[in-house]
Amino acid sequence: MKRMSEQEAYDRLADFIQDYIYDRGWEHLSTMQVRAVGEVLEKKNNLLFTAGTAMGKTEAALMPALTDIYEHPVSSVGILYISPLKALINDQFCRIEEMLAGTGLAITKWHGDAAVSRKEKLLLAPGGILQTTPESMEAMLCRHPENVRILFSELQYVVIDEIHYFMGNQRGLQLLALLERIQRIIGREPVRLGLSATIGDCRQALAYLNAGSTRRGRVIDYKEEKRQYLISVTATRIGSTDYPADYGRKILEQSVGKRTLLFTNSRRECEILVAQVRRLALRAGFPDCYYIHHGSISREIREEAELHMRQSEGPVLTGTTLTLELGIDIGDLDEVIQASQPLRISSMVQRVGRSGRKTMRSSIAFHLRYFEAEGGVLENLDLGLVRTIAMIELYFRETYVESARLPCCPMNLLIHETLSILCQKGCLYPRRLAAEVLELSIFRHISQEELRRALHCMIEKDLIKVYEDGAVGMSDAGERLCGNLEFYAVFESEETFSVRWNEQEIGTLDRAYRAGDSFFLAGRTWEVKGCDTKHRRIDVEPGTARADIRFGGKGALHTDRKTMERIHQVLASEGTYSYLDEEAAGILTELRAAAKRRGLLKLLAREPGTDNLLVFPVLGTDTIRTLCYVWNSGGLACERVMLRGFLYGIRIHSMTEAGFRSSNARILEQGCRISRAYLLKKERMEGKYFDVLPEELRYRELMEDVLDLKGAAEFMRTLAQGEE
């Protein structure tokens, strides 16, 4: 079929869409938007839209889909729009509502903070677009499955925004299961439209989008953007103080007079840095234009920060974590600052894309803290600068982004979906229950025997019970579990304390504080007046004392193989990088010398002053962890070599190189095995149902979805053959 021209695509769109395009002064449709019209309206394929930030992916998907449901009205919701964040839904709502003006089509938010009256109105007269999250869909299926048929009986399209955010984790698998369960109820397969600016492997992403669907899938990408990137990297040597004044001063100088997002890798770092930069700015006589935006801040304060970013014409800086990484509209930015090394390339790409949306000149400044190694201890070596350079080179030179790893044995989710299906259906006989669960595409690698074992453990843990006629249903404890709002999320949520000042919630903390204590939150210091542990409430008033704050958890420093290869290249070469400041360039020279001196560029190196052997395989995090488990299970005493949180190699205790090669060959000959007892002791699975699962199912999920036994075995064979 001949592709549409731009004029043909424009003419094919509904009148109100044409008016929307004209009113906004668009000079033309992008090739992505033109292709989407034909693919959506004529071919009805599942489509994956990949393009840079602010390149019109949402419009490309919605304009033809809206045209379809406008020209061919249905008696239910026509478009189900799924987003990872409620804040993103709220942001997109206004944008889409403008597009629908005067059409009679409505858009309705459906999540925990949305107005009940709007939901009730939609149930009485279903239509238009429904925006929601996976958790809200789970709640609907569990508590009011009848609403699924009412709302979606003629559903035409499912839009998955920020699809990369769902890939490679249990929440993304939960979403796929929910879509299939909805398809079963309504007896139809809507067209799926996935949107992302950060896809490493399009084939893999398309496989995720198509899971549980029989429609053909296509990728529509957009490579015509002429975006320029301005990159700079500074490094500050750190002594006894983690955040010295010089470091804060560099961030202030970088951001003064600009509209800036300051990204950090933790909530604690965000609070400390914004407070420090704000203090330096006020002392220098600059206006107070500093805000905080992260998951422990109340929704009202986050929305206030978004409003200031969006409406303020003057300079403004907002410190944030993941919460502003996605596409919430905060206006055009002059600068993005990344404090500390990026966690992943994909995250870095999302962040840099937040600046320069109008000018197509994105600017990102990396401000790194360099911890100088003390006492000659290998683990004190800080390679954060080298890892950052490797990521910059891979993306900005080669447009490389890591691929997500799609889980195939989600045992935790097996428990969750079994409970959810029983909550939706009531009692089911075992054969019917097995069909309902195992016919979901996400469980295609799980056997009936494994489900049977999981069910037995659920009975033992009093989550389900078997009735006299053999049917399986919820126990009283299971009913209470599924009736709790926290059940609908597959991830574990922290138990938090609400922090309040004059009855206004400032945010939440995951630990108690005593009266008289002080802490940072929302960019300010607060003094504790009282703590009610029973009702999990901390009452505060503004304070002036110097303070700190702690939050549970932190982002994982995960490195894939290609990034590790580039790290070794950066260390081994003598090349220079124009985006480094003088201090960063000097630190790189020191690190290269240290790498050669310590043997970091060799596969095998003797640890000075010991009889230990160091192994530095150029492999990804998952594979190095697996090697450590395999060698330990094979009788070698070894441990991971963590260079300030960065997994770089393995230390083999009391071992010569000849002895290690011989032992490696022996373990390889016996088959690369990992002791179940050893692995379960060392590695805890993510998810709520770790303690419910039998050991063999926990072990299988770890082996299949967390570790890389195949990659470890390949490396061991290479080592045995002496091909390193």
Image (tube, rainbow, N blue to C red):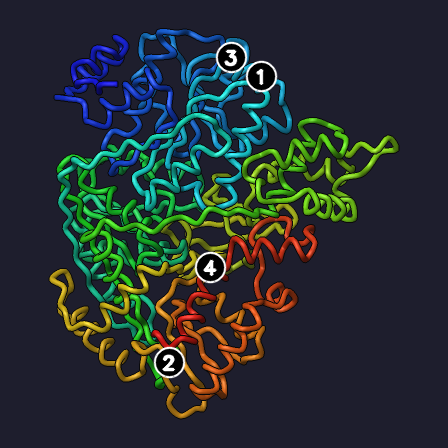
Which is nearer the eye, 324 or 239? 324
Q: Residues within 10 Å of mark 1 (few under 14, many from 20)?
A: some
Q: Residue furthest right?
A: 468
Marks 4 and 2, the one that precedes in the sequence:
4
Specify the quadrant of the image occupied by residue 567. bottom left
Could you say whether the residue bearing mark 3 is in a helix, strand or loop?
A: helix
Indicate the position of residue 413 as horizontal and vertical percent values.
Answer: 59, 43
* Disc 3/disc 1 C-alpha distance (Å): 16 Å
Indicate the position of residue 325 as horizontal and vertical percent values.
Answer: 33, 44
Point 42% across, 21% down: residue:
157
* Residues tagged 4 and 3 counted as in contact (Cβ below 8 A): no
Q: Is residue 694 visible?
A: yes
Which residue in the structure is indicated by mark 4?
Answer: 550
Marks 3 and 2, the one that precedes in the sequence:
3
Indicate the position of residue 522 as horizontal and vertical percent values.
Answer: 39, 48
Marks 4 and 3, the one that precedes in the sequence:
3
Which residue in the structure is indicated by mark 3?
Answer: 121
Q: Is residue 307 visible?
A: no
Q: Is residue 208 left or right of residue 247?
A: right
Indicate the position of residue 520 as horizontal and vertical percent values.
Answer: 41, 55
